[in-house]
Amino acid sequence: MIYGASAVYYREFLILRRRLTRLIPSWCVSPLLYLTAFGFAMGKHVTLDGHTYMEFLLPGLIAMSSMTQAFAISSEINIARFYWNIFEEIQAAPVSDLSYVAGEVLAGMTRALLAILVVLVLGLLFGVVLSLNPWFWLAILLNSFLFASLAVGIAMLVKSHADQTLMTSFIITPMAFLGGTFFPLESFPEWARNLIYFLPLTHAAKAIRTAAFGNRPSFVSLMILAVIGLLLFCLSVWCVRKAKD
């Protein structure tokens, strides 16, 4: 299993390394726009639980970036499936379904971690310093693992890039704006808070923000991320097996 997962991951890593000079500027665009627009507009005038809005916003952007970039591995898988026929070659190779999923998930997590480093640097430029403690990185890893696992499963189900775009619009975009990224959940009406509670990004943003402020995140939030991530990982293995049929 280890050799198979390493081979899949190494392939994705080589592609990532070659595109890194183009990806880093693209990773900067959205966080920079949000920090500039929301940060300068409300950063010095709004205080949330003793923190400026800029301090509140940056952990949310980290949660959102880890989600979107981990999920972005689905696009790479689709290109490999539809244009390069890499998936068919992997089927013929001695690589198990579990190894394939593990390699792709690790690749998605790597993309997410690199994108987060970019966001942290941007935060420093805006004068925001967070507590980068082990709980902070654990929450990020769990969130990245969850959405990378989701990405692999969805990539096996879609039939075209149009389907992939549709999935992103219905799954990722709503969570990016409703998962406590830009505004505290208390700002929403009670019925909306009850629905938002079931979004994984809600717990990721909460855990990352709590850890970034130097406190221990909720054990419940971390467990929810871990359990959902494991379930999605197992579901992705099943989807890969079905895609071979």
Image (tube, rainbow, N blue to C red):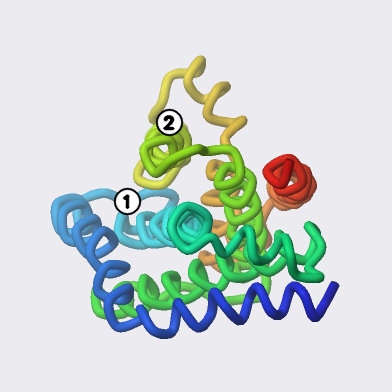
Q: Earlier in the sequence, mark 1 or mark 2?
A: 1
Give the percent coordinates (x, y) of residue 240.
71, 48
Pick whichever, 61 or 157, lies toward us: 157
> Where is mark 1, residue-wise?
47
Q: Residues within 10 Å of mark 2 (few under 14, many from 20)?
A: few
Residue 132 occupies quadrant:
bottom right
Tag nearer the camera, 1 or 2: 2
- Report the disc number at residue 55: none
Q: Report which residue position mark 2 lands on.
A: 170
Amino acid type of disc 2? Phe
Query: In the drawing, does residue 75 fall left or right of residue 238?
Result: left
Residue at the image point whose x is 59% and y is 38% from the top: 157
Which residue is rendered at x = 42% and y = 59% of the image? 65
Q: Quadrant of the C terminus?
A: top right
Residue reaching furthest right?
A: 1
Q: Position of residue 148 (x, y in %)?
A: 59, 56
SS at circle 1: strand
Location of residue 29 in the rendering, given as x and y in whole percent from the top left corner:
22, 64
Report how many numbered discs are placed on residues in the image.
Answer: 2
Question: Does residue 17 appear anywhere in the picture?
Answer: yes
Residue type (three-letter) at the residue carrying disc 1 = Thr
Residue found at the very far top of the displayed protein = 191
Marks 1 and 2, how far apart in space?
Answer: 32 Å
Q: Secondary structure at mark 2?
A: helix
Q: Quadrant of residue 26?
A: bottom left
In the picture, measured across the screen, residue 114 lies left or right of residue 43, that is right
Do we see residue 69 in this rendering? no
**Image height check: is 134 above or below 102?**
below
Quarter of the figure with the N terminus: bottom right
Q: Residue at x 32, y 68 (%)?
A: 27
Residue 180, horizontal then vertical, whole percent: 45, 42
